[in-house]
């Protein structure tokens, strides 16, 4: 039996290597046929303000966060990128027609999943989550978020796993592996040190080399090495004076050369200030995309301040993502995932992550049932089930 299992494992491994080799050849074939203008378009998202942007692609999955720029001449479809660390965040009701709805499962938030200490269970959550991503027509989910919970006042702590990078890295890897087993992508974020929301787009995090590697980078390193997410999203903030999306040491030296990351890097929506520096640093896809970014890339390529080698490197990363996507493979998504079955998995994971306190000793010295209980704060009366903003998903 062990010999049979080994043979199966070797066959699967060989098949995977052959597929990767075929994809690399396809990427190089497409790249060799592209003009400079087509390359620049592929490095910038499909925002509605862009010249030639595809409205059809943006409307494929209403409510999705963004799409990549389609190049019809090269048979390259637009990829759909959706928010949702705790469930697919898309519009549940479309064209004012409530007779047909598109509600996704609300999975436990990251902190609750981390509290299970159970990577096998989190993998099951990821597998169910990934099925919904695929069946709703999404190619990449912009999750999981795995920054460090430094301060309880951080408005996005619910999206993050822990104050411990080892827990965060291992739980994130389990979720990524589960999601990507469906043939869809993830985007671990926000790389790196996005640990507060106030002034996040201008904040300069001053961090020593040791603290950066042992605390803030460690979780990402574990997730990359154990799961190889399809993409990484960098953060809005600066680290030691340089915007993360413009930081070559972070996006190329550490992420790719030291850790062996093989996927694509994208910016957070509107992140960074200098598109040419972002491309040089290894930020492959600038989201959601502006005409100014496109023009800056073209101009820099023509005046020699941005090398074609750097452009081709980044374009190859975007192409590698596209050719393994459901959209490129023309997957016929159903828009009908089994949310009843997924609700049971969600319920099981939530119960495993709950922490119960015993009413004994000095911790909870309640001698008898109280006659009155004070509930403090708005959330005591109005439940926020999955957080808010991009971290929320629509529930019936």
Image: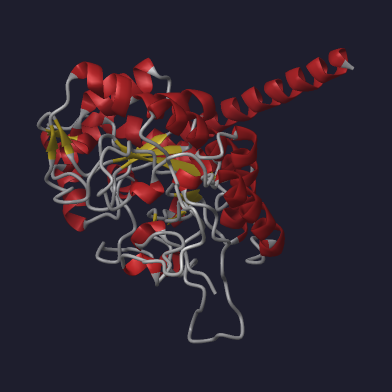
Left or right position of 162 against 191: right
Residue in the picture at 18% in, 44% down: 272
Of residues 364 and 384, the one drawn nearer to the viewer in this rendering: 364
Left or right position of 80 against 295: right
Residue in the picture at 34% in, 47% down: 157
Q: Position of residue 125 (x, y in %)?
A: 61, 46
Residue 90 sits above or below residue 193 on the image:
below
Does residue 118 appear in this view?
A: yes
Q: Residue 305 lies in what quarter of the image?
A: top left
- Marks counted in the figure total 0
Q: Residue 392 lies in what quarter of the image?
A: bottom left
Residue furthest out toward the front = 367
Residue 213 sits above or below residue 388 on the image:
above
Q: Position of residue 140 (x, y in %)?
A: 48, 49
Of residues 42 and 16, the one drawn nearer to the viewer in this rendering: 16
Q: Position of residue 202 (x, y in %)?
A: 11, 46
Q: Position of residue 55 (x, y in %)?
A: 39, 69
Does residue 301 appear in this view?
A: no
Query: What colour scheme has been applied to the protein in the rendered image?
Result: secondary structure
Q: Quadrant of the C terminus?
A: bottom right
Residue in the picture at 25% in, 35% down: 193
Residue 379 sits above or below residue 241 on the image:
below
Residue in the picture at 56% in, 41% down: 324
Q: Quadrant of the N terminus?
A: top right
Residue furthest out toward the right = 1
Left or right position of 34 against 280: right
């Amino acid at each position: 039996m062990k010999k049979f299992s080994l043979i199966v494992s070797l066959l699967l491994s060989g098949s995977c290597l052959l597929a990767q080799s075929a994809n690399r050849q396809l990427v190089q074939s497409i790249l060799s046929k592209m003009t400079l203008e087509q390359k620049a378009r592929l490095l910038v998202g499909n925002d509605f303000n862009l010249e030639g942007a595809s409205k059809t692609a943006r409307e494929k999955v209403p409510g999705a966060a963004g799409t990549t720029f389609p190049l019809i001449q090269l048979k390259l479809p637009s990829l759909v990128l959706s928010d949702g660390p705790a469930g697919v965040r898309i519009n549940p009701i479309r064209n004012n027609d409530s007779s047909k709805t598109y509600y996704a499962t609300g999975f436990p938030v990251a902190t609750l999943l981390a509290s299970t200490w159970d990577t096998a269970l989190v993998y099951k959550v990821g597998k169910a989550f990934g099925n919904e991503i695929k069946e709703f027509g999404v190619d990449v989910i912009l999750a999981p978020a795995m920054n460090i919970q430094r301060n309880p006042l951080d408005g996005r702590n619910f999206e993050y796993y822990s104050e411990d990078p080892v827990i965060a890295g291992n739980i994130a890897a389990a979720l990524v592996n589960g999601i990507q087993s469906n043939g869809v992508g993830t985007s671990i974020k926000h790389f790196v040190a996005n640990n507060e929301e106030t002034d996040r787009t201008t904040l300069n995090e001053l961090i020593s080399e040791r603290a950066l590697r042992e605390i803030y980078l460690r979780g990402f390193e574990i997730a990359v090495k154990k799961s190889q997410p399809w993409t990484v999203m960098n953060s809005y903030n600066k680290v030691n004076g340089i915007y993360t999306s413009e930081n070559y040491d972070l996006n190329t030296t550490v992420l790719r050369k030291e850790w062996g990351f093989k996927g694509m890097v994208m910016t957070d929506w509107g992140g960074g200030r200098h598109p040419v520096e972002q491309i040089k640093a290894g930020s492959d896809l600038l989201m959601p995309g502006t005409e100014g970014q496109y023009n800056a890339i073209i101009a820099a390529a023509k005046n020699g301040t941005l090398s074609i080698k750097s452009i081709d490197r980044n374009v190859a990363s975007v192409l590698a993502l596209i050719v393994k996507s459901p959209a490129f493979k023309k997957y016929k998504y159903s828009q009908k995932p089994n949310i009843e079955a997924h609700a049971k998995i969600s319920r099981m994971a939530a119960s495993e992550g709950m922490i119960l306190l015993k009413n004994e000793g000095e911790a909870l010295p309640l001698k008898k049932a109280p006659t009155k209980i004070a509930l403090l704060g708005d959330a005591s009366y109005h439940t926020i089930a999955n957080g808010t903003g991009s971290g929320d998903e629509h529930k019936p």
